[in-house]
Amino acid sequence: MRNDSSPSVRLQGVRLHYGKVEALAGIDLDIPVGRMVGLIGPDGVGKSSLLSLVSGARAVQDGCVEVLGGDMASSHHRKEICSRIAYMPQGLGKNLYPTLSVEENLQFFARLFGHGEAERRRRIDELTQATGLQTFLTRPAGKLSGGMKQKLGLCCALIHDPDLLILDEPTTGVDPLARAQFWELIGSIRVDRPGMSVIVATAYMDEAQDFDWLVAMDDGQILATGTPAELLERTGSDSLESAFVALLPEEKKRGHAPVVIPPLEADEDDIAIEAKDLTMRFGDFVAVDSVSFRIRRGEIFGFLGSNGCGKSTTMKMLTGLLPASEGQAWLFGHEIDPHDLDTRRRVGYMSQAFSLYSELSVRQNLDLHARLFHVPAADIPARVQEMVERFGLEKVLHELPESLPLGIRQRLSLAVAMVHKPELLILDEPTSGVDPVARDAFWRLLVQLSRRDKVTIFISTHFMNEAERCDRMSMMHAGKVLDSDVPAKLVEKRGAKNLEEAFIGYLLDAGGGTPPADKKEATASADTPSEPPAHVRQRFSLQRLLSYAWREALELQRDPVRATLALGGSLILMVVMGFGIGTDVNDLRYAVLDLDQTTLSHNYQLDIAGSTYFLEQPPLTSYEDLDRRMKNGELAMALEIPPGFARDVARGRPVAIGAWFDGAMPQRAETVQGYLQGMHQHWLSEQARRQYGEAALGNISVENRFRYNPDVKSLPAMVPAVIPILLLMLPAMLTALAVVREKEMGSIINLYVTPVTRTEFLLGKQLPYVGLAMLNFLLMTLLAVTVFDVPITGSFLTLATASLLFCFISTGMGLLASAVTKSQIAAMFFAMIGTLIPAMQYGGMIDPVSSLKGSGRIIGEIYPASHIFAISRGVFNKALGFSDLSASFWPLLLAVPVILGLAILLLKKQES
């Protein structure tokens, strides 16, 4: 251990607020170099906030935070020392990527810190041998147990030889054996690197007992600092948990007393739950293997086991939430039927995450759950009041759950689980993160429920002092019950010092845990020459950029649904939009109300009936018939030939033919009107020719000739515009989701605390989606040529180059959307609104940009979609090449750095 006069971390007057909530209230602290320092205290006291400031993941609001000799408010200093700090955030595997294997996660982090191939291999082999992960290199991180995830997270943090290792509750939710192995690994690493400082936040007082130096925290303030021995001596306590309680302010510990559990007085034959050979299979995997036990009414029964051992699955089978593959179970003498809802009403469940409705008040949560469990309406007010008085919720009835302290929220969650007065109560790690005073108060409530009300209590926990309070407990591993007995007898059977040692012994005998490192292999690895720690930071690293591109491509490859929707979805949308958005008018149904019934009126009708645009329907018989058939959509157009039509035409009198159009679709109605007027003029010219000869028509006529689209069909116009629309919308949405998903999962922390720059991060994320978008372009182009029969008449290379630029633009818009949003829903909405609406409205897809006026014209000229439309239509329809379309390339080239620059500027390298 190293003694250094200058601290590794110094905090002076540090304050931190989340809105109106003060997380840190003027912290002054010096953390010595080369020691393992523990921040102890329950959840919500400011431990994680303090560590995020020290790591550089969160911006300093007020005060001074000095780390490794410099101010963390300085971006220059953060860049210089970020490669000397390793930060493992709170949560099982929060800094890991679940679809990547153990090997791939380690390769990714090693590349971020600039290691070459040989050095990466050496470090990965050394770390995985030391942690027992060597045999799991190909397993996805998401399929590891909790303890293995934490070991992998530690390996990723240690891949670059940090001077400061920050661990935020690294063993929360991890079983005792995995915890012991984790700290054994940390100890061996500290032996090899005695100068490395380690700061750990923990809620487990038993593991804090072995730290060099402790900082006790509560309500954003420091209660005391010193070695574990000094804190015990200062408070006159025999355990750190008792010492922490003694350090709390008087108002918080007032009324606190040790938990006393009276002996259980129950009839041995009064069985609440009985299981016989319960087995649960998921395919070939046996989650629970022939479990049998009996639990008496009113008993507090503990489940203790390694992560993923089958505890939760067993509980679900016993309560009817999950049908067993084999075996039987009885609840209060009745065989459990998963379809019997009356059985479920006899059970109350309290999850670790507190299943409360955050938008409802305390009273409303209690009222709602009472109704959900069919408490009679007349009894609900009294039942709610009973729960309020029993669990001490009188002062917070109108508060929202999120605003409550953790201990009170815990009591509310228990009240909600008990509001329908169940006979069986299931508690899944209910005291995780709660301070010792609140934890003891909670246990007094459980004892009261058990001993007075005869409620049978199932409880799973990783706190050994809680497990010792159970009447009996089962130890599980790999789906099997290793032993069930009174905690003291389990310790006695193993000849152990305490319950934790006994539990670890049971697990090791059952093959639990990971094998220790091979001493010879570890020595051989240590003898291999290694690169010196590289703490020199590069301004831009192609390796870091390509590392993110490689990782994103792997995740995309392993998510077939996302990749299939990206490719198949675009083709489906192209078919829908290509055939659905058209201006062609064919086979329009019409009918005639002929009130003249002459040869001339029939001749007029025959001229229209011969057109390919119209489809004649049975004639109209009256105005009521006309109104009815147009109203129900049977007709798109109706003609009314007035009485005396032939007579008035022969005499040269003005004649008005009535034309009725369905105006529900104005654009189509105007097109139909144009067709009708054209045919009307043709009929008039034919009549004049027959009566007066060719001379009557004159020698001047207009001969129409259409270039590029001689048949005036909409498909050759629409398909070249649909391709850019889909290249804009879908890649933008996919890219936005890819980045904001990291924010939701928490892996964005790797951007905050590693040397990767915002430019490297965003470009690396972008490249796989650009490649996917270009594949999309090729498939849609093939579809246009084969299915839509729209040939490419110009330069395909010109179109492909423009599409590549446009793919950078569209994915850049996705990055921009993700930079300013925090949820996937918001990112999707932002990306869709920001791409589809401007392109349709101002891009010239239907109406030319030249026809727009005012601000719409300006937007149309600036927006990249209008230029890609011009290029696409020019290549498809006009046989144009690069020289003809070069003017449209310049706006696309300018848009790429502008959009990407905005995304980089708006993406934060620290959490605010």
Image: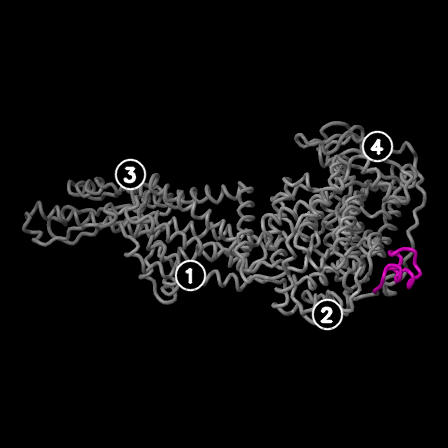
Residue 597 appears in the figure:
yes
Assess whether residue 418 is covered by the magenta stretch. Answer: no
- Kindly identify which residue carries mark 1: 895
| Mark 3 or 2, nearer chain start | 2
Q: Is residue 226 magenta?
A: yes
Q: Mark 1: which amino acid?
A: Ala
CA gap, disc 3 to disc 2? Answer: 83 Å
Report how far apart the C-alphas of labels 1 and 2 lie in the structure.
Answer: 43 Å
Label 4 residue SS = strand
Question: Where residue 293 is drawn, which disc sits there?
Answer: 4
- For residue 598, side relative to residue 191 (left or right): left
Label 4, label 1: how far apart the Cα atoms are: 69 Å
Which of labels 3 and 2 is toward the front?
2
Establish if 126 lies above or below 819.
above
Q: Give the vertical position of 493 relative to 860 (above or below).
A: above
First in sequence: mark 4 vs mark 3: 4
Q: Which residue matches tag 2?
A: 14
* Tag 3 residue: 617
**Residue 725, horizontal then vertical, whole percent:** 41, 51
Magenta range is 225-246
Residue located 55% across and 51% down the image: 547
Q: Main secondary structure of the magenta part?
A: helix
Separation of residues labelled 4 and 2 (CA atoms): 54 Å
